[in-house]
Image (spheres, grey):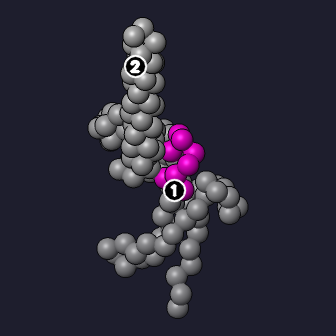
Amino acid sequence: MVQHLTCCRRLSYNTASNKTRLSQTPGNRIIYLYTKKVGKAPKSACGVGPGRLQGVRAMRPKVLTRLSKMKKHISRAYGGSMCAKCIHDRTKRAFLIKEQKIIVKVLKTQTQSQKAK
């Protein structure tokens, strides 16, 4: 005969906060286990990357407050907020812009020195 299962809590509706799964006890009984909501890993702040940030745990906000800082971010610049590709692109863009400004300055000094002669 099949074992009859009853809900432990008063709420009997199938809501998001009332999800259950079946579990077998050592005494060979089948019971309901109430599951917790699944968290999501943070998305990249740049908005360009398709998925979630890697290396950061996917947890609910209340659990995140209890975690240490090391488990909430990656140890690099913009670690917990931007993906590595976007940081790399920004660094490269900043370097190229700075190089371009230096070239413009050098060309300006060359033209001024030629006018002086």
Q: State whether residue 105 appears in this view.
A: no
| Number of numbered tags placed on the structure image | 2
- Count neighbours of disc 1 (C-alpha within 10 A) and say few if under 14, some if 14 to 19, many if 20 or more: few
Residue 51's label in the rendered image is 1
User: Tag 1's secondary structure?
Assistant: loop
Judging by the rendered image, the residue that carries numbered circle 2 is 110
Residue at 68% from the left image edge and 63% from the top image edge: 14
Residue at 68% from the left image edge and 58% from the top image edge: 15
Q: 108 or 34, which is in the foreground?
A: 108
The residue sitting at the top extreme is 116
Q: Main secondary structure of the magenta part?
A: loop
Q: State whether residue 103 appears in this view.
A: yes
**Residue 49: image location, x then y, percent:** 52, 52
Q: Is residue 57 magenta?
A: no
Circle 1/circle 2 CB separation < 8 Å: no
Q: Mark 1 vs mark 2: which is more N-terminal?
A: 1
Residue at 44% from the left image edge and 30% from the top image edge: 100
Quadrant for the C terminus, please.
Answer: top left
Q: Nearer the observer, disc 1 or disc 2? A: 2
Q: Amino acid at mark 1?
A: Gly
**Residue 69: image location, x then y, percent:** 33, 33
Magenta span: 44-52
Q: Quadrant of residue 24?
A: bottom left
- Relative to 14, 51 lies left or right: left
